[in-house]
Amino acid sequence: MDGQAQRYDAIILGAGAAGLMAAARAGQRGRRVLVLERADRVGKKILISGGGRCNFTNLGAGPANYLSSNPHFAKSALARYTARDFLGMVERHGIAWHEKTLGQLFCDGSAQQIVDMLLEECARARDFGGEVAIRCGEEIDSVEHGSELGFAVTTQSGHHAAPALVIATGGPSIPKMGASGFAYDLARQFGLKIVEPRPALVPLTLGGEEVLFREISGVSAPVVAMAGPKGKQASFPEAALFTHRGLSGPAILQASSYWRPGETVTVNFLPEEAPGWLTGLKRTTPRLTLRAILRERLPQRLADILADRIGLMSELGNAPDKALAEAEKRLAAWQFTPNGSEGYAKAEVTVGGIATTELSSKTMEARRVSGLYAIGEAVDVTGWLGGYNFQWAWASGVAAGDAL
């Protein structure tokens, strides 16, 4: 690195949600910040989120809504910058919003409003004696550390140096948006451990006898989906969607973050029914069949396939109570064994990433590399579907931005 490097107080790699938030926060503390983005524009994942309306946070966001090898790590940042704090910024910028189910907040208009807001916050740095320069289309050729310049970053446009470097390049989910494992490569370069990444919030695929369920592609139903180790299963009461490849929909996407290859996903198709409901119907309406009962409660094609698999064809009055109890149990805990997922191409986020043991939960700074920070999806903190991952991006970005 020669002496002609442009110097800054901090260089942030990645102009997504976390990177822009950190840049705005540091800039408004009077820092000179350079943001380098590989894509041709900032905030690409923000723009496609929430069907283009950006599910920008969740009012219920708390540590319990996140997966991490250290479930306590996210507590500090989430407590210091809450969903209400971000909502306050949204309202100051005059962005109209609405709440959907389960505390999910969306723009009334377009996700572009959130990107514009973040860029305006970066521009406000000048009011505080700071500066945020954002450069898109920048491929990182090398990152070095240890010289008198601190961190030296070389791109095709030149040399840049700063005493602080923030890794905000996300994970490998949605590669068509330019996502990659660059954050992990960089972390390894500096000796930081990585928790093995895997696709999360991702549709699951079915094979074997379960291929039958692909025949009802497009059918959706409210269910409770469960996945994870026995005794510690996470449970999600939302819609499941059958696809031409397997299972999707919010309940399945949520469960997928907890699912590991070889494990099952459990689905309760009739979560409103209490134990004993079928034997109760036998007493009151003995001439009904299970197929007819399921058709009243579920989409017809789903009802038929479940009835066929259970195989209880007689009228309820002619069925033994034991057989009805078994049918109840199966409908309340239907076991699917996915043969895989649709991978990073369809995954909304990544579970795993830079190990939290390497970072300060207060500042996001690497414990063993002074001036190196990691934020957002690059870190081993992954939120549920519904605005939680954005809230982690905002909170971790603020934590780092306040420390730069």
Image: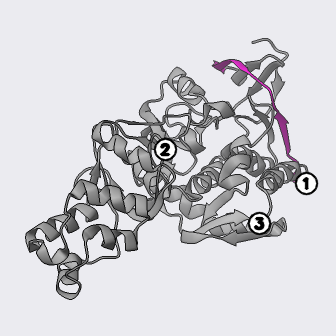
- Amino acid at the residue labelled 3: Asp
Q: Please say which color scheme the image uses.
A: one colour
Residue nearest the viewer, comparing 207 with 373 = 207
Which residue occupies 51% across, 45% down?
A: 360
Q: Quadrant of the C terminus?
A: top right
Residue nearest the viewer, comparing 320 with 258 = 320
Residue for badge 2: 202
Residue for badge 3: 108
| Disc 3 + disc 1, Cβ < 8 Å | no
Answer few, some or many: residues within 10 Å of disc 3's Cα (few below 14, many 20 plus, some between 14 and 19).
some
Please state the horizontal and vertical placement of residue 235, each as a whole percent of the image: 36, 61
Number of numbered discs: 3
Residue 142: say if magenta. yes
- Side of 160 where 203 appears, left or right: left
Bounds of the magenta segment: 128-146
- Side of 382 where 259 appears, left or right: left
Q: Quadrant of the N terminus?
A: top right
- Amino acid at the residue labelled 2: Val
Q: How much space separates mark 3 and mark 1, taking CA atoms? A: 29 Å
- Amino acid at the residue labelled 1: Asp
The picture quadrant where one finds residue 290 is: bottom left
Residue 159: say if magenta. no
Mark 3 element type = loop
Which residue occupies 55% across, 59% down?
A: 78
Q: Tell which circle, 3 or 1, labels the residue nearer the N-terminal end.
A: 3
Please state the horizontal and vertical placement of residue 401, each as a whole percent of the image: 69, 48
Q: Tell which circle, 3 or 2, labels the residue nearer the N-terminal end.
A: 3
